[in-house]
Image: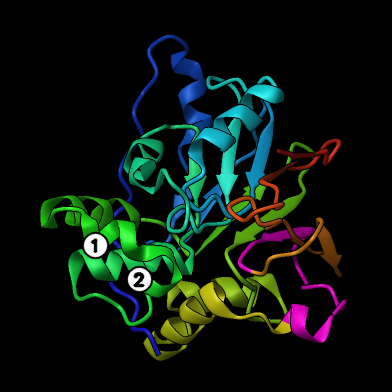
Amino acid sequence: MVCMPTIPAYREPIMMPKFPHLSAIHAPVSVSANGYYAKYGANIFGRDFVVGDIHGEFSKLSKLLSSVGFDEYADRLFSVGDLVDRGPESHQVDDWLKKPWFKSVMGNHDYWCVEGGLDTEPVGHRKYGGEWFYSLTSDEQKSIGLALHGLPIAIQVEGRNGEKFGIVHAECTCLSWSRFEEALTGELGDSYRNYHATEAMWRRSRHANQTTIPVAGIDRIFVGHTKVAAVLDLGNVRYIDTGGVFENGLLTMVEIGGSEAIHSI
């Protein structure tokens, strides 16, 4: 089992002097002491979106944002993780993580780069899309590893009408969202935290078993990791990785709350 590293303290986002009053929507309301769990308040100024596994397809993501008239000052974009590997522009991830309106949880491919950049090369990384990473200099690898190191395992977003939305890469590993939060924040002990943090990046049991029992205490959870032909709902868990990096696949983005409109490219 992968041993999760200690995630550094949250770094304040870059402020945007053009509309300083909007900066509050880009900062989390709270982040757990270990950095594994972040909460964001309601966006009263614009829209919130969540995008499936990007895998280095940042040009495609830019086109998708343009197609919906994304407002960098008022809108927010959340990601289910796997920002890197397989795609041609994985090296741009550091620049994207500096955008104050872009927030992501950690995916298993992101974590592989954390391991490779800050520790030792993980088994299987090159085989599953990580060749680009090991063609970089050691300083470049470290820089990307550090940028990804601070990503939380789970994000909670409040809707305008008080709804509660969850974002995690692969799966919520508990029957209730509150229990999942307790596990990730370490309230149940370090071993429990490490187990659930790892499984949250890797597990596919809900999809494999076609489980439709809702996760309690949360209105909807957005996940990636498991490639689906089209956006799929199993209970209140929505799968949005439609394989944007693969031939004939699509990069999908969903509006959080409101119309819940689905956009793909």
Q: Nearer the viewer, residue 146 or 46?
A: 146
Which quadrant would the C terminus be assigned to in this image?
top right
Residue 247 position, x and y percent, is: 65, 53
Is residue 6 in sight in this rendering? no
Task: Identify which amino acid the numbered label 2 is placed on.
Answer: Arg
The main secondary structure of the magenta stretch is loop
Asked whether residue 61 is drawn in magenta, I would say no
User: Label 1 belongs to which residue?
Assistant: 134
- Nearer-the-camera pick, 128 or 25: 128
Relative vertical location of residue 23 with respect to residue 26 in this rendering, above or below: above
> Secondary structure beneath disc 1?
helix
> CB atoms at circles 2 and 1 under 8 Å apart?
yes
Q: Position of residue 226 (x, y in %)?
A: 66, 69
Q: Give the residue at x 70% y 52%.
A: 249
Segment colored magenta: 206-225
Measured from the top left, where is residue 259 in percent x and y?
86, 36
- The type of residue carrying mark 1 is Tyr
Quadrant housing residue 210: bottom right
* Residue in the picture at 30% in, 78% down: 122
Left or right relative to 264: residue 18: left
Q: Which residue lies furthest to the top in this view?
A: 18
Q: Please, what secondary structure does the residue beneath circle 2 have? A: helix
Label 2, label 1: how far apart the Cα atoms are: 8 Å
Residue at x 62%, y 56% (from the top left corner): 246
Q: In this view, does 201 lie above or below 65?
A: below
Residue identified by numbered label 2: 126
Label 1: how many Cα within 10 Å (few below 14, some 14–19, many 20+): some
